[in-house]
Every structure is written in structure tokens, then in C-alpha cells.
């Protein structure tokens, strides 16, 4: 049974306790872009040549207090269609090149511009699909009381291979236990895991059902276990 959707209430002190977070975001993002800009340009060119235009994938996601923004990623799928002109399923349109971009996390690099614009933070709960909003429990809604992250606590603990309840519980734990030290730790661990290509599933359908399908199948949206 689907619960009525309620937006998360602003939690006094959550953002106020983060005076250095935006400064860290800007400093690290500007430094990263200065180093990675040549890589971004090359990947954009290769995506344009191999997959066509546009080379960027834009999708509306819920941000701080569920305010929508356009998440930027490099495109990883072709426009292949069937005989009737309809797009083929995602798995059939995901090319070998697209799988490489996902496995190496290069497809995520345009998200740094989301951080620069203030849509996202370097660290926070990952911005999930808008269609999932009605399926969060009361505690899980707190993930939207901070800016969504380029990486996050759940991402260094298994990413797409985690069950939904566990992943969302880790998001809530991060919100309730945030510190600059924790952010720095997550950034270092993210860099290490990207180098080792850990926890990356090029095709997420292979490792998890959609959150809405899972919770509709369970018949209710129950509170997540918070470690």
C-alpha cells in the first residue's frame, strides 16, 4: 500500500552544522576540474563520435528538500530502435563503450558541474529517481534534508550491490552523523574504489529491482533499519 507523499520538513541545524561543507565542495571541485578538464573534453568527443548527440544525459532528480534539478552524466546508450521505431530496452542500447564509461565511473564526471552550481554536494545521498519519492519511509525522507552527493556513504559500502533498505539506511546514517572528517574519508575511499572499479554495476537491472517495484511488491513502505 503506497503511503501519501509528504515532503521532508526542513530540519533545523542540519545545514547550519555544515559551515565548511560548501567551501570544501568548491575547493575540491575546482581543483578536480582543473585536472580532469582534458579528460572530460576527450570523453565528450568520444561519446559524440560513438553514440551521437547529445553527448550529455540530463535527467530531473530530486535535490535539497526535493527541489528538482537536472543531473548531468555522459551518455552511455545508443538510440537503437526496433522495426516500429521504438527505442530498444536499455540493456540492448547499452554499448560496450557505455559499459566502460560506467565501470570506470567516467560517465559521472559531468556531475562535478552540478556540484559547482550548488545542485549537489561532493558527498551526500545519491540523487535517485523522482518516481521513488512516494516510497520512502519517514526516516528515509531525511536524505533530502541535505544536498544530494556526487558520491556518498552508501557508495563506498557497496553502491548498486546493496539492498535498497540497507542503502537508504546508510544515507540516513550519513545525514545524522555528518562531519567534515567523514566527508574527507568518503572522498578518499571513493577515489580508491574508483581506481579498483569496486561496487560498479554497468547494468543496474542485473543487481537490483527498481525501488518502486520492490516496495509495491512488499505491499508497504516500512521503516529502514538504521545501524
Image: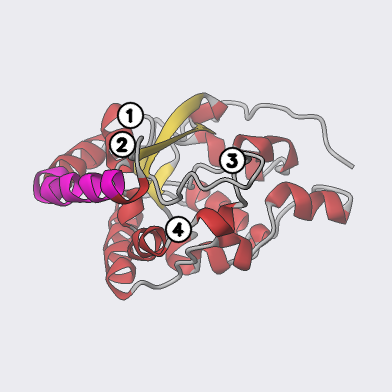
Q: In the image, residue 113 lies at what x, y percent?
A: 27, 35
Q: CA distance from mark 3 to mark 2?
A: 18 Å
For marks 1 and 3, the one nearer the N-term is 1
Is 179 in front, or is 78?
A: 78
Q: CA distance from mark 1 to mark 3?
A: 19 Å
Q: Is residue 227 visible?
A: no
Q: Residue at x 57, y 52 (%)?
A: 90
Span of residues in magenta: 33-49
- In the rendered image, the quadrant that contains the N terminus is top right
Front position among marks 1 and 4? 1
For marks 3 and 4, the one nearer the N-term is 3
Q: CA distance from mark 3 to mark 4?
A: 18 Å
Dot 2 alpha-carbon crowd within 10 angstroms: few under 14, some 14 to 19, many 20 or more: many
Residue 115 got which mark? 2
14 in relation to 184, above or below:
above
Q: Which residue is mark 1?
A: 118
Q: Which residue is mark 3?
A: 129
Q: In the image, residue 183 lies at what x, y percent?
A: 33, 53
The secondary element bearing badge 4 is classed as loop
Residue 141 got which mark? none
Q: Is 28 on the left or on the right of 177, as rendered?
A: left
- Whether 40 is among the magenta residues is yes
Q: Is mark 3 in CB contact (under 8 Å) with mark 4?
A: no
Front position among marks 1 and 3? 3
Q: Quadrant of residue 225?
A: bottom right
Q: Which residue is mark 4?
A: 153
Amino acid at each position: 500500500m503506497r503511503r501519501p507523499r509528504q515532503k521532508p520538513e526542513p530540519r533545523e541545524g542540519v545545514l547550519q552544522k555544515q559551515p565548511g561543507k560548501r567551501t570544501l565542495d568548491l575547493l575540491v571541485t575546482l581543483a578536480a576540474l582543473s585536472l580532469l578538464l582534458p579528460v572530460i573534453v576527450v570523453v565528450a568527443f568520444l561519446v559524440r563520435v560513438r553514440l551521437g548527440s547529445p553527448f550529455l544525459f540530463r535527467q530531473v532528480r530530486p535535490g535539497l528538500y526535493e527541489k528538482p534539478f537536472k543531473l548531468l552524466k555522459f551518455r552511455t546508450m545508443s538510440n537503437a530502435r526496433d522495426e516500429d521505431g521504438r527505442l530498444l530496452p536499455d540493456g540492448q542500447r547499452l554499448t560496450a563503450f557505455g559499459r566502460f564509461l560506467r565501470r570506470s565511473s567516467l560517465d559521472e564526471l559531468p556531475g562535478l558541474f552540478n556540484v559547482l552550481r550548488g545542485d549537489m554536494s561532493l558527498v551526500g545521498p545519491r540523487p535517485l529517481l523522482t518516481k521513488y519519492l512516494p516510497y520512502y519511509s519517514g526516516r528515509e525522507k531525511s536524505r533530502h534534508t541535505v544536498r544530494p552527493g556526487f558520491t556518498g556513504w552508501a557508495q563506498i559500502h557497496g553502491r548498486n550491490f546493496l539492498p535498497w533498505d540497507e542503502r537508504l539506511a546508510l544515507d540516513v546514517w550519513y545525514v545524522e552523523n555528518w562531519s567534515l572528517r567523514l566527508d574527507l574519508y568518503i572522498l578518499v575511499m571513493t577515489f580508491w574504489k574508483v581506481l579498483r572499479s569496486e561496487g560498479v554495476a554497468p547494468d543496474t537491472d542485473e543487481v537490483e529491482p527498481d525501488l518502486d517495484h520492490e516496495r509495491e511488491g512488499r505491499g508497504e513502505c516500512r521503516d529502514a533499519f538504521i545501524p
